[in-house]
Image (cartoon, rainbow, N blue to C red):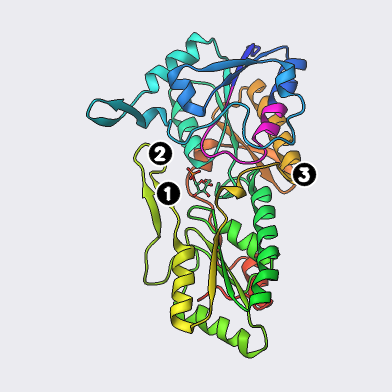
């Protein structure tokens, strides 16, 4: 077994709370126990293509377990295989994987640990096929990566969204309004479901259960008849009506996922007002769900993920991603992890429990 002397680490895609805790979980044992040099690659795969690095020293990874964001920077526009290049006539999307491979070799990396979501894991898989030594760490507030029970960042996002719902409850009930909150999650409803259940939302709308406008309005009106003159509607940004489409805020070909969702909350608020005459207010929680400190759960999970990623690298288990199964952190081939997105099974226990306590899914 070849000892690994130089280990690269990067954070790719949208940031989320816990990235720094993973970097720390990788760098501390790599430096202290293995005597390795840890090369931080700046701004995700963009930095790998464009050649931006910073060697980490112990001081860099001290005191960062509770720090949000990422000390390395990140980008969701740097897929080396579909890399946006500015030209005089606009932006061309080119395959720049050669530059990334050249940099990896020029920097004498023995392994590279990539912390990221679905887009990052697809890139890890492609570089593994091209012979680079990559290990993946699953990150995303959306919790939509299969082959792991949980991604770090999810608990922090749900905590922020739940607190927001708690706050909307008091103002909503004071004014007898219908309060709509739009949360993130891309094509999966995990954040809406987790925070909606924890915050006691009256209606939860998720992409996996297409809703009907009449059903939402019936539920809200019925609550009023029973003395509850306010309602909380928690909407995932990817939710859609049975006859409608996803609501897209913007398309940007430079992004790894060109579609930026957003706007369904406004639509839900307007429609309920139009159909019931009730006063509605809409809150879009946005990036508050991604910013700030990770919860203790995410700090612990992130540290275990970082430690396990280093173990995998020294075991030469490249092309693998760390993964949580029950209470144990283990590993899975990245190829398996990217087969499909992990969405909410409509017949899962959490959905059944929410229905049992009177939550409507608008279906
Ligand atoms: O994947 C994480 C996420 O926050 C999604 O929930 C959301 O759709 C997207 O990223 C937002 O991306 P951006 O930060 O580029 O607006």
Residue labelled with disc 3:
296
**Disc 2 residue lies near ligand 1 with CB under 8 A:** yes
Along the line of sight, the residue nearer the viewer: 61 or 109: 61
The answer to whether mark 3 and mark 1 are in CB contact below 8 A is no
Relative height, residue 140 to residue 83 (above, below): below
Label 1 residue SS:
strand
Whether residue 62 is visible to the viewer of this picture, yes or no, is yes
Q: Residue 311 lies in magenta, yes or no?
A: no
- Determine crowd level at label 3: few under 14, some 14-19, many 20+ residues with C-alpha closer than 10 A: some
Nearer the N terminus, badge 2 or badge 3? 2
| Range drawn in magenta | 9-25
Number of the label disc, if any, that sits on residue 245: none
Residue in the picture at 73% in, 34% down: 303
Label 2 residue SS:
loop
Q: Position of residue 282 (x, y in %)?
A: 53, 65
**Disc 1 residue lies near ligand 1 with CB under 8 A:** yes
Along the line of sight, the residue nearer the viewer: 227 or 1: 227
Q: Position of residue 73 (x, y in %)?
A: 56, 29
Q: Could you give the CA–CA distance between mark 2 and mark 3, rounded to whole angstroms?
A: 31 Å
Number of the label disc, if any, that sits on residue 260: 1
Label 3 residue SS:
helix
Nearer the N terminus, badge 2 or badge 1? 2
Residue labelled with disc 2:
255
- Determine crowd level at label 2: few under 14, some 14-19, many 20+ residues with C-alpha closer than 10 A: some
Along the line of sight, the residue nearer the viewer: 56 or 26: 56
Relative height, residue 100 to residue 285 (above, below): above
* Number of dots carrying numbers: 3
Residue in the picture at 50% in, 68% down: 209
Q: Could you give the CA–CA distance between mark 2 and mark 1, rounded to whole angstroms?
A: 9 Å
Nearer the N terminus, badge 3 or badge 1? 1
Q: Residue 24 lies in magenta, yes or no?
A: yes
């Amino acid at each position: 077994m070849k000892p690994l002397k130089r280990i690269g680490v990067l954070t790719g895609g949208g940031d989320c709370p816990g990235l720094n805790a993973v970097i720390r979980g990788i760098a501390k044992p790599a430096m202290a126990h293995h005597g390795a040099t840890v090369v931080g690659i700046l701004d995700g795969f963009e930095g790998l293509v464009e050649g931006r690095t910073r060697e980490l020293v112990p001081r860099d990874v001290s005191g960062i377990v509770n720090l949000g964001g990422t000390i390395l920077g990140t980008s969701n526009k740097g897929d080396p295989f579909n890399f946006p290049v500015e030209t005089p006539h606009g932006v061309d999307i080119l395959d720049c994987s050669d530059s990334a491979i050249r940099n990896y070799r020029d920097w004498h990396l023995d392994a590279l640990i990539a912390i990221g979501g679905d887009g990052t894991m697809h890139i890890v898989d492609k570089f593994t096929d091209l012979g680079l030594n990559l290990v993946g760490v699953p990150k995303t507030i959306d919790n939509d990566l299969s082959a792991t029970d949980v991604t770090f960042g999810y608990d922090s996002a749900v905590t922020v969204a739940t607190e927001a719902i708690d706050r909307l409850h008091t103002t909503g009930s004071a004014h007898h309004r219908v309060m709509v909150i739009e949360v993130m999650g891309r094509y999966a409803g995990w954040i809406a479901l987790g925070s909606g259940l924890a915050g006691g939302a009256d209606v939860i709308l998720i992409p996996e259960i297409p809703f009907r406008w009449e059903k939402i309005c019936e539920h809200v009106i019925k609550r009023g008849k029973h003395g509850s003159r306010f309602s909380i509607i928690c909407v995932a940004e990817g939710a859609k009506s049975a006859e409608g489409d996803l609501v897209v805020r913007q398309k940007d070909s430079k992004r790894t996922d060109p579609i930026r969702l957003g706007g369904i909350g406004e639509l839900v608020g307007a429609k309920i007002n139009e159909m019931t005459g009730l006063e509605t207010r809409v809150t879009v929680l946005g990036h508050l769900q991604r910013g700030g400190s990770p919860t203790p759960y995410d700090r612990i999970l992130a540290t275990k993920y970082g430690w396990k990623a280093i173990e995998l690298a020294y075991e030469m288990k490249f092309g693998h991603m760390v993964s949580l199964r029950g209470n144990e952190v283990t590993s899975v081939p990245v190829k398996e992890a990217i087969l499909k997105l992990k969405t909410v099974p409509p017949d899962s226990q959490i959905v059944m429990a929410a229905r049992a306590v009177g939550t409507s899914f608008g279906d």
